[in-house]
Image (spheres, helix red, strand yellow):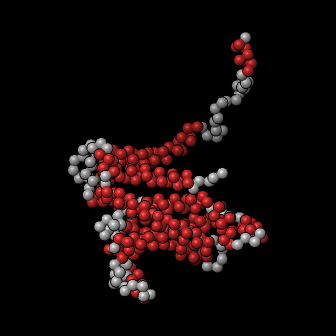
């Protein structure tokens, strides 16, 4: 009796209907074959190197000499590494200084060139050109233009009566930091401009026309329409800027080599020095892994902080 009731309650399923969904045009293994190259690429160039790096971080790997297993000594030594802590604080300071101005300058440039008017295409090219040229080339140019006696920077400032024209920009920590920050703002704001401009051009024109009929000013339109619609794009631009600043290396290596002393040594510069100057590859790899984890956590926190709120 119980068996009959259970069978009666059980929904009828036609034997012609299969519970397993299959493609009408491709067998299931076709999808596996298509994703196999990508999986192999990730495994060979990401997972295997990452595993090898973890192994290296557990040794004293001196780059030249015998390798000895040291366990978690490289990680515990990070806590008492004052030089590493100094580089972290300097990198955070640099990130705080450049992130806001890059976003504001990029937004202002995007507002300037978002409309299709005469000369806007030329302005977009001019503003985006420094990013295309790259920080490496811009840094080498800055080395020449920051020379105390012959550089264009001192010649311009002397012509304006601001300095006597003999300022040594790259041998003073605060001056070098200020110069690098200005260089990065100039070189990277073009990317932020392009990201925000693309988002602005996707906003329907009807939004602005309706607000104009209601008597909204330009700033009210930007505050109530443009910025809310561009929330995700702004978040992406901020995340790119913050991650790039935390991993800054090129401009500091070319312009100051972390000097004078260690006044302009960033985290990546410090890791580079441990690996290829002091030949302590094991310790440098441990620092790199910690840096990757920290940057990942910072990025995840930014995604959470800038997420869309219902």
**What residue is drawn where x is 33% and y is 51%?**
79
Front-lying residue, 305 or 57: 305
**What residue is drawn where x is 40% and y is 53%?**
291
Q: Quadrant of residue 150 in the image?
A: bottom left
**Does any portion of residue 105 appear in the rendered image?**
yes
Would you place residue 171 above or below residue 302 in this image?
Answer: below
Find residue 217 and report its horizontal and vertical position in percent.
70, 72
Quarter of the picture containing the N terminus is top right
Front-lying residue, 100 or 201: 100
Front-lying residue, 97 or 192: 97
Find residue 232 and report its horizontal and vertical position in percent.
60, 58
Find residue 223 and report its horizontal and vertical position in percent.
65, 66
**What residue is drawn where x is 39% and y is 75%?**
142
Q: In the image, is 41 to the left or to the right of 198?
A: left
Would you place residue 76 above or below residue 108 in this image?
Answer: above
**Does any portion of residue 209 appear in the rendered image?**
no
Would you place residue 146 above or below residue 202 in this image?
Answer: below
Find residue 306 and report its horizontal and vertical position in percent.
57, 56
Q: Quadrant of residue 21 in the image?
A: top right
């Amino acid at each position: 009796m119980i068996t009959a009731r259970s069978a009666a309650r059980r929904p009828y399923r036609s034997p012609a209907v299969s519970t397993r969904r299959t493609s009408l045009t491709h067998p299931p293994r076709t999808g596996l074959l298509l994703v196999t190259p990508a999986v192999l690429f990730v495994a060979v160039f990401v997972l295997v190197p990452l595993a090898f790096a973890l192994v290296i971080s557990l040794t004293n790997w001196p780059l030249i000499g015998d390798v000895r297993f040291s366990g978690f000594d490289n990680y515990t030594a990070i806590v008492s590494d004052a030089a590493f802590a100094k580089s972290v604080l300097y990198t955070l300071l640099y990130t705080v200084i450049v992130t806001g101005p890059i976003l504001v300058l990029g937004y202002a440039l995007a507002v300037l060139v978002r409309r299709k008017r005469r000369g806007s295409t030329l302005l977009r090219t001019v503003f985006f050109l420094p990013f295309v040229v790259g920080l490496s080339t811009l840094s080498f140019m800055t080395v020449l233009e920051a020379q105390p006696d012959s550089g264009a920077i001192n010649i311009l400032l002397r012509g304006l009566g601001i300095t006597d024209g003999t300022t040594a920009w790259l041998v003073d920590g605060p001056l070098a930091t200020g110069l690098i920050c200005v260089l990065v703002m100039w070189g990277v704001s073009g990317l932020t401009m392009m990201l925000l401009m693309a988002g602005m051009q996707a906003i329907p024109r009807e939004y602005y026309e309706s607000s104009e009929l209601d008597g909204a000013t330009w700033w009210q339109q930007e505050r109530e329409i443009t910025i809310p619609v561009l929330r995700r794009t702004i978040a992406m631009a901020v995340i790119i800027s913050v991650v790039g600043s935390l991993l800054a290396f090129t401009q500091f290596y070319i312009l100051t080599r972390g000097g004078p002393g260690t006044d302009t040594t960033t985290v990546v510069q410090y890791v580079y020095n441990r690996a290829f100057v002091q030949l302590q590859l094991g310790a440098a790899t441990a620092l790199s892994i910690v840096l990757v984890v920290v940057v990942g956590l910072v990025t995840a926190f930014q995604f959470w902080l800038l997420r869309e709120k219902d």
